[in-house]
Amino acid sequence: MGIFVKSLPGNNSMKMTDPVWNSSRSAGSHPVNLFSNNPPNFAMPSAQLQPPPANFLPPPLSIVNTAVPKSTTSLVQGSVPSFPVPSGLPSMNGLVQPPNLSTFRSEDLFTDVALSHPVTAAPVTNVAQAVSNFSSSTVGKTFPPLLPLPDDPHFVKQHVPPPTVHLSGRSMSSISGHGIGSSPISEVQHNFTGLQYPISSPINSIIPDMGNLNLNALSPTRTAVVDLLQEKHPIPSECLEPPVVILPRPYDRDLESSDSSVLRCTLAAVPESPSVLKKCRLPLGLIVHPFKDLKKLVMVETSIIVRCRSCRAYINPYVRFVDRNWNCNICGRANRLPDEFYYNPQTGKVGDPSLRPEIQNSSIEFIAPAHEYENRPPQPACYIFILDVSARAVQSGYLVIFRDVLLESLRLLPGDNRTIIGFIAVDSFLHFFQLRENLKPKEFVVSDVDDIVMPSKSFLLFYLDDSINAVESFLNDLPERFADNTDPKCALGSAIIAGFELIATIGGRLTVFQTVLPDIGNGSLTSREDPNLRAAKEVTNMSAASDFYKNLALKCTERMIAVDLFVLGDSYVDLSTVCDVVTYSSGSVYYYPNFDACSNPMEMERFRSDLGRYLRRKIGFEAVMRIRLSYGLSVHSFFGNFFVCSSNMAKLSNVNPDSAFGVLLNLDDNIDQPVVCIQAAVLYSTCHGQRRIRVHTICLPTSESILEIHNAADLPAIIALISRMAVDRCLYQQGTIQMAREASVNAVIDCLYAFRSASASREYGTLLCSRNMRLFPIFILALLKSKAFAHGYSIKLDHRISAMLQFKIMPISNMILELHPNLYALHAISETNPNAPLLPLSFEKIDRHGLYLMDTGRYIYLYVGPGISDTLCKSMFGVNSYKEINSMTVNLEDDNATNEHGMLIYNFMRSIIGDRLQKVPVRIIKEDSPSKELFLTHLIEDRSETSFSYVEFLNFLQKEICGK
């Protein structure tokens, strides 16, 4: 064991002490003790609403809108108790919750909102008197009557018309989330069995038999019913948006802003009773995308936030005002409305409280009062980069890409003048670096990776603003520093421990780059993959080999540290084990198979784009998310990367706008109200040292009609929830790929059988479903053929695990493209028709003379038929014939078109990815190239040697349903 000190190129003047660590920086007026012996501690007191004195004057209120505001609005005052955290927290998967969770804070990513000039309301001379005068003339009135009383004569319960999509299954409950459900899984959602029991006959034994199909046309009057056997090539011709929620009066109000994609329920009409839910055979759950980059997010700053005294729900558009009280739409309790809530800071007058921004927006963000949510100064943004510099890593060339992207993003990293940064390199040794402005760079090498002796933290962490020139100089020299490294080993586990020790008293983010299996030091592993079994029906070694990385993640979670992992290269790294440090610390995994900066430009461009987005996107620290539900509903399981603190609360060390979470719900009791309400609230801290609370609320009608509920099913949300449950079954419940596949198929069978049983039409030879569910079978078939759940052909274990990990956190829109790519015929574009037609995913639709674009979300493929015209070759690729086209990547930012027709095609291609947040690599695939398989594997309607076609799948479903 030992520490070696190397002098790095730079200024010869050097000091071994740095006065910056003896001083303090602050966010506002708060001192920061970066290296205290105590872990982060964030108080969240439970303040009580107190009536204001008679002569009370409200403090200045301000609102900041992330979009250009049409009008200035403001927020209210009320109580601000934060999420209460129980003293004894349940375990997750048998692991004890880390201590010191009684108090913590968190933050969100929308931190670059201009807060320097908030709109401040002019004070009122006597608010109490004004409110009294206002109320005296409106006694007994409601503002507005958002929630009906039981005897409300104006209430009319309406049925929900068919929205978009729907699903079902046979025991989804068997795929549960991380250790929070107290009830037996078999009882979840009343025997909803879509993901539990195997199907009665093997899927792969299907024999195509199309001769006996009875494709009877449906009656024109049955507009909500579709016969799937008459639609052999389904196309998502319209965007799979959430169903249009039709609320009964008086809940159906027009809101200033509402984005349903941030909080989507699988059923836009909630069953009124557990028995109805059981008959529907549909999963009831949520897909929560709480930090999505919203085009409009109203931000409100106030000293008091109005919340329910009982359930602690935040005031929202679906509460009901009665006189000077408001009734909570979650628990029903009547709460006193603070006098300040009648005051409109926009007009400077007292008026209708329903005009407040909290009542006009389903998604809103509060700037939390410091005295209510701070127990210590806000955490500074802290970023530690752990770089694999083994021989394989150096050969891959990723260090050059990392250097270039970080240099471009260094001044754009989220944070303020307190932003802290540090670097650790790892092979057989650990390499630490001291970088200071006007000081000679210094490298500390630790040779004993089993028992790490850390250099002083004051040498290894530094404020970015003070040392940015030194950091840039270090990054410029980084690839050359390890260019001759021949060490093949990697002590990754020891490096993560070192990074954790560096920022344990601060919190922050560890960004880890890995290219080889960690085979030395703490957390060392041995290869468990057998290449001969990659195509086997049952996949082994999907669970972790040890608990080392899981336990390390729990320590990181306790100190509010998230770990993100970039895996590059083609060697086995045992991702099923290493990923635990990411999963339980609310991080993300980025996987780049066969990465090589020189020979694989497709993955190189994707890595460059992903890393740039990762470094620059908004980030939040120290977050907690709580789900509040109306009576009768409860949370059964969470799905995603986080730590579950209680039955309805998850803890996230970091949060980002690219991750979404799944929530499986229980229907515990009959619902006697016409609507149910769901609220997701996230308390977090911004990278600028500000406490914020983001609140999303939705209101859904209830129904006792099975057909009505099927017509209101949200297919994309259902697919997203099923995929998360299937992944959870394989990775965390000792399940198998075959069990997940069979359970997914059973979900379709049960859905279609339940709809057939409830509908009046039961003609033989048909396969009926609601119109919004017509794409359900094709999406399940796509899930079965995805890299996560496919079998019968060779898939590397790490590649399979990475696909599963992506399904865990993918937003709905990304998942839909991942499962069912869009296929366009580019050769059909003309001046009269500038948009390419959308085609089914079948090779039957591919013309050898055509040019096609396939958009998979993460990749775009240009498929060139061998009979493509020389004119199209010239206009698109600048060559004279098909033979001269190279299989290469295309940069859509370049003007490659040589004529007007080519320009039309390039404009269409740019329009597809125009609103995406990161660059999508485009690859040319010729019909006779080895990379053709990349294109063909996404044609999910076709049959292969190991899987069935879409038509065969429909025949199988029909036989199973008729046999019930």
Image (cartoon, helix red, strand yellow):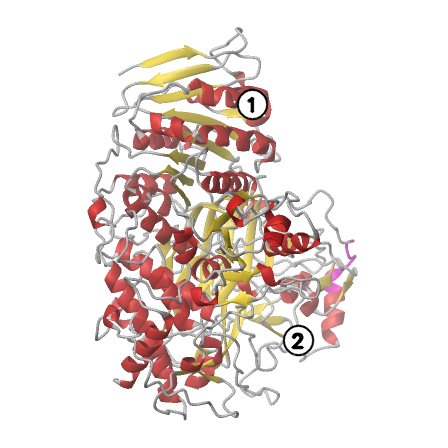
Q: Position of residue 916 (x, y in %)?
A: 58, 51
- Labels 2 and 1: the sequence-earlier one: 2
Indicate the position of residue 182 as horizontal and vertical percent values.
28, 64
Residue 606 vertical placement versus 459 (above, below): below
Give the quadrant of the C terminus. bottom left
Position of residue 347 measured from the top left corner of the image (x, y, whole percent): 79, 61
Please tell me which residue is depicted at 67% across the width and 69% down the height of the picture: 354
Q: Magenta includes 127?
A: yes
In the depicted view, which residue is nearer to us: 526 or 577?
A: 526
Q: Is residue 511 left or right of residue 52?
A: left
Callout in the foreground (2, 1): 1
Residue type at tag 1: Glu
- In the displayed structure, 633 sits above or below 389; it is below
Q: Residue at x 66, y 75 (%)?
A: 144
Magenta segment, prevailing SS (helix, strand or loop):
loop
* Callout 1 secondary element: helix
Report the side of 733 relative to 803 (left or right).
left
Q: Which residue is mark 2?
A: 144
- Where residue 608 appears, as percent x and y from the top left, is 51, 38
Q: CA distance from mark 2 to mark 1?
A: 58 Å
As drawn, the label of residue 689 is none
Q: Which residue is mark 1?
A: 472
> What's the amino acid at mark 2?
Pro
Q: Nearer the viewer, residue 863 or 533?
A: 863
Whether 223 is drawn above or below 76: the answer is below
Number of numbered callouts drawn = 2
Q: Is residue 119 magenta?
A: no
What kind of element bears circle 2?
loop
Tell me which residue sits at (31%, 28%) in the image: 490
Q: Is residue 460 visible?
A: yes
Write the start and end of the magenta stretch as one range: 122-129
Asked if residue 640 can be seen in this view, the reply is no
